[in-house]
Image (cartoon, rainbow, N blue to C red):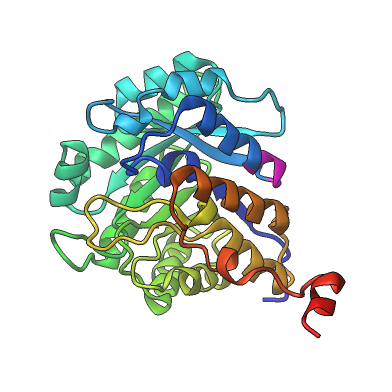
């Protein structure tokens, strides 16, 4: 652990955090959320998904969100796409500078999520990565259901390694392993990452964990110890998967930041500004969010707070 000095956190609340919320969030409020994330230090944000608005009404204003994004040369704005049509929409905004593509580890989930087989999702991912390169921008890929499928159950690690190896040929900047339904555990996480690093030692690995069964933060730590360089997280822990029973959302950005910073691993994020963003977002959504930091507060307390205890 002494060799790990920093970890990148990708803020996914504007997309994965919001997309399954029944309460519609306006374009203005989505842009405020993005601005608050930037103010807290985020430099890589998944701002929208370019999908059929009938399937995901929350993302119907993807182009409007992109039109309002702050001009900032330090920022990487990610647009999630599932197919060529989505990629074309994202590219047409002129504001997305990284495409995120998704391949799914099982056929049943791939058909439910994207209307294609698992192998089909790999081929589409490779084609979109190549398209991004031809347009002068980067692309990355996520393997959904890397740790388990809501329809088929256990997912063989060899299958995930096979998919990662195939997508790697297209030249993504990284590949993410997603615990889409929150069934992963630290031992499984470490084992899968080690298997991938044995085959592709130069591949940057990102991880995406949902805290459905309370293992999200532990999985983040296991992933980093195994060599993952980047972690997806959502302010407040907002989010979830429509296919996951009892989904509790993504790991919270402020919880991940607290854990890493207390361990001496830099994230570039300001915990107080993240907590302020959490408070604002909880008010907007009219409900408490899942973040434990929002409930417990930061540590150590300020000198003024300590005085108040006595």
In front of the other: 255 or 303: 303
Left or right relative to 108: residue 214: right
Q: Residue at x 70, y 74 (%)?
A: 263
Q: Is residue 138 visible?
A: no
Vertical placement of residue 44 versus 48, above or below: below
User: Considering depth in this image, is 146 or 95 the residue closer to the camera?
Assistant: 95
Q: Where residue 131 appears, x then y in whole percent?
A: 42, 23
Is 303 covered by the magenta stretch? no
Q: Is residue 289 above or below residue 281?
A: below
Residue at point 69%, 58% (across, down): 271
Which segment is the magenta one?
A: 37-41
Q: Is residue 184 visible?
A: yes
Q: Is residue 309 above or below residue 12?
A: below
Q: Quadrant of residue 160?
A: bottom left
From the viewer's side, name the closer residue of 303 and 225: 303
Where, quadrant-wise, is the N terminus in this rendering? bottom right
Residue 18: quadrant of the picture: top left
The x and y percentages for residue 78 are 51, 34
**63 relative position to 240: left or right:** right
Residue drawn at (69%, 69%), measured in percent from left and top? 298
Location of residue 144 in the rendering, given as x and y in whole percent from the top left corner: 32, 51
| Number of residue marks | 0
Examine the rendered structure and indicate whether residue 245 appears above or below residue 176. Answer: below
**Quadrant including the C terminus:** bottom right
Q: Residue at x 77, y 73 (%)?
A: 301
Looking at the image, residue 197 sits to the left or right of residue 244; the answer is right
Q: Main secondary structure of the magenta part?
A: helix
Q: Position of residue 295 (x, y in %)?
A: 56, 68
């Amino acid at each position: 652990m002494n060799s790990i000095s920093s970890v990148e956190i990708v803020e996914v609340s504007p997309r994965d955090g919001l997309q399954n919320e029944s309460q519609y969030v306006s374009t203005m409020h989505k842009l405020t959320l993005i601005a608050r994330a930037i103010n807290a230090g985020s430099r890589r944000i998944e701002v929208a998904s370019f999908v059929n608005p009938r399937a995901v009404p929350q993302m119907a204003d993807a182009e409007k969100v992109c039109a309002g994004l702050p001009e900032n040369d330090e920022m990487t704005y990610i647009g999630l796409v599932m197919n060529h049509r989505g990629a074309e929409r994202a590219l047409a905004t002129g504001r997305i500078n990284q495409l995120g593509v998704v391949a799914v580890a099982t056929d049943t989930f791939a058909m439910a999520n994207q209307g294609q087989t698992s192998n089909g999702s790999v081929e589409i991912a490779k084609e979109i990565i190549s398209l991004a390169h031809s347009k002068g921008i980067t692309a990355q890929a996520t393997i959904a259901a890397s740790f388990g499928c809501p329809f088929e159950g256990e997912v063989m690690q060899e299958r995930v390694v096979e998919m990662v190896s195939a997508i790697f040929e297209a030249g993504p900047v990284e590949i993410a392993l997603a615990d889409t339904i929150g069934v992963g555990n630290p031992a499984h996480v470490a084992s899968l990452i080690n298997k991938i690093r044995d085959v592709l030692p130069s591949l940057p690995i990102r991880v995406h964990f949902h805290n459905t069964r309370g293992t999200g933060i532990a999985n983040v730590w296991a992933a980093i110890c195994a060599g993952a360089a980047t972690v997806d997280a959502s302010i407040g822990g907002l989010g979830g998967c429509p296919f996951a029973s009892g989904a509790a959302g993504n790991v919270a950005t402020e919880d991940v930041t607290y854990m890493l910073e207390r361990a001496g691993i830099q994230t570039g994020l300001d915990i107080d500004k993240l907590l302020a963003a959490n408070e604002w977002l909880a008010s907007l959504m009219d409900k408490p969010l899942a973040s434990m930091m929002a409930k417990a507060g930061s540590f150590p307390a300020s000198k003024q707070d300590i005085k108040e205890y006595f």
